[in-house]
Amino acid sequence: MFSTHVCARRFHRAHLLSAAAIFLIPSFAAHANELPGKERESAASTRQAAIKKNPEQSSRNTSKQLGAHVKTGAAVPISSNAAERLVVTATRTPQRIQDVPASVSLITRQDIERRMSSSLADVVNRLPDADMAGGARTEGQIPEIRGFNGRDIILQIDGARRNNDTGFAGFSAPLYIDPAFVQSVEVVMGAASTLYGSGSMGGVMSIKTIEAKDLLAPGRTWGADLDGGYQSANENAKGSAKIYGKWGKFDALLAYAGQSFNTIHLGGGQKLAPNDGTSNSALLKLGYDISDRIRIDFGQQFYYIENYRPDNAQAKHLQIYDSSIGKYVPYNQQTGIRQDDSTFHVTTHDAHGNEDGRLTLYRTKNTSWSGPFQSLYSGETQTLETYGFDIQKTLRKDFRRFGNHTFVIGSNYYRDINHTLQKNGQGGGNIPDGQQQVYGFYGSDEIKFPHGIVLTPSLRYDRYNTFASDSSTSTSGAILPKITLAWHPNRNWMVYLSWGKNYRAPTIQETNMNYIVTPNSYYFLPNNKLKPESARTYEGGFSYNKSGLFSTKDHASVRATGFYEDATNLIQLSVIGHHWSPLYQRNEINYQYTNIQHATRYGIELRATYNIENINFGLSYSHLRVKDANTGANLLAQPDKVAADVSYTFPKIGLTAMYSLTAVEAQDYDSTITRRRPGYMLHDILFDWQMPGKPWRVNFAVTNLTNKTYYMYKSISSNNDVPEIGRSFRFNIAYKF
């Protein structure tokens, strides 16, 4: 699609590294300013003890302090505690993000509100080695981590797995949620099979939805939020309403969000149409504290999007040959996708307030349908329903000279049920009915030794069974070890190394997709001999955090990760031939999921921040390469990316102004030439005005300021060349009762 001379107009890696150096120099300086040894160790132990005693309360206290400064209009102090954000996905236990021995990114509610996005794409696309690629339509955006997508990534909402990977070769996005309901997103880059089982070759994206306790102001028993906004680039009008409260031991939240959208204005003045639709969402959360140590909660989420568009949401336009009139006609259909999630949790805490047990029961169901198209296609409905549970227990024991141990043991299970029904009442379709069940048992032990040494061995046994309607079955299992060694020489530094084995079971879609029953433009051929993926991952990195680096009011942090992976039987959609299509009157492609016998991948990920009083700087950088070890061919790999932010807060009026840069190098090395894309740079300007002492919040932004025409690297739909969204004026206003 893009010739070599077009790809030559790229953002060079040298420029990326130069930008990284400019932002990182302050973070590596003046290590001599640290406290003396004994004083440093005493301060570190005091702070760690406070966090261990009650990490959730520590986080809430920090939030209250920040909220109080915003309300009064005073300057927000930047301390080390402000950076002590807790994450749980990487280790299944709460830890400060700078202490986690893994590559982790955290998206906060504030990040989402400032971007005012109609989907999570805007915030995810700024993370290292993570993207929501697939075009400007919401239904086409697919999460990718370290070059993996689809079922190579575990997506979970409040602990419930989202396994839907329906449609032709994953053209349907596997994630549907309105950003108005998202409290935070934790993204673990890299394999996490030992703790989460099949599907985490690329990583885990864990989304937490809002709860009453997240939104209630201190001292209040109830509250309500209203907000509405508009984005010019996709003619998107959106709004949401939330009401929530806490009465004694009971708390509840009810929320609604709706959006409407139309023609998408792409970079450079092009338009993407048709794109005429609406989405509606609802969220119910109920919680009850049985005692100080036991809590139960229930969540029900509903999302529905309906759109008139091409059947493939990632395509600019589609045409189909109508033999009755002897010419091509536009292939647009009415489509709809509904996502339903039900979750139930039981959480227990020990005498010190630390979570020590959790049971999660869930059911998720994704239903996608397409209406009839003239007399050529009757339309069909496809569902993927998932039932599952996850139970874990945490035990803490100090064995003195043998270390302080945190044991995590657990088990999880899920069953996928796939069903396809054509509008004429017949079953079948391109993916036959089938089921897959996966279960596993896992355990880990975080051992803290003297001198800041932490050793974490973990082990898992996982097994899957796949059953299809055509009687084809497959089954396999895996033993998955992992070991991590971390060293905390002082309160500022953490260095770690890890090694682990990972795997993923092939899905029903990959083994049994069979789209040759009618003379369509392409064939998807089944492959029930597909083997599970497996890989050995080597990873290392460090984090550095320092308050008072250049002054008493600043804070700097740097986190870096390098990794190498040796994979066998990597599952990839491959071109295996061509056929004559009477429908399109030309030769078309034959696709099949196949195993790449031996592949290697390596890369680095870098994150850095520097804050001084009301000024904040942020930077991330990623580099990834994936090769077929036998042929030397370059496989799916996201291009090098830099994301940088600088913001200034005017405390007296509560206004924050931010400039954001995203610079992506050309993807001109993929051996599948049609997947190559030129590099690009994007500029955004954002304003966040939280009126001191007032319940109003106003956000305004101009994204893609220069109206740049750019194409994201789409690892799945290599033959769809649709520019991304162009310049967009965004406005949002919110009122808190």
Image (spheres, rainbow, N blue to C red):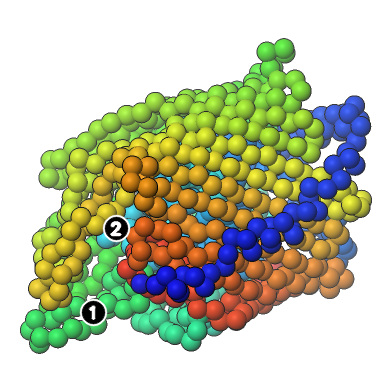
**Residue 606 makes an appearance in the image:** yes
Considering depth in this image, is 641 or 336 the residue closer to the camera?
641
The C terminus: image quadrant = bottom right
Crowdedness near tag 1: few (<14), some (14–19) or many (≥20) residues, C-alpha within 10 Å: few
Per the image, the residue denoted by label 2 is 169
Q: What is the secondary structure assignment of the residue under circle 1? A: strand
Q: Residue at x 33, y 54 (%)?
A: 165
Q: Is residue 736 above or below residue 611?
A: below
Question: Which one is earlier in the sequence, the residue at label 1 or at label 2?
Answer: 2
Disc 1, disc 2: CB below 8 Å? no
Please indicate whether residue 356 sits to the left or right of residue 611 in the image.
left
Amino acid residing under circle 2:
Ala
Please indicate whether residue 52 sits to the left or right of residue 280 in the image.
right
Q: Position of residue 205 (x, y in %)?
A: 50, 49
Amino acid residing under circle 1:
Gln
Q: Residue furthest left?
A: 324
Per the image, the residue denoted by label 1 is 319
Q: Quadrant of residue 473?
A: top left
- Per the model, the C-alpha gap separating discs 1 and 2 is 19 Å
Q: Position of residue 89 (x, y in %)?
A: 56, 41
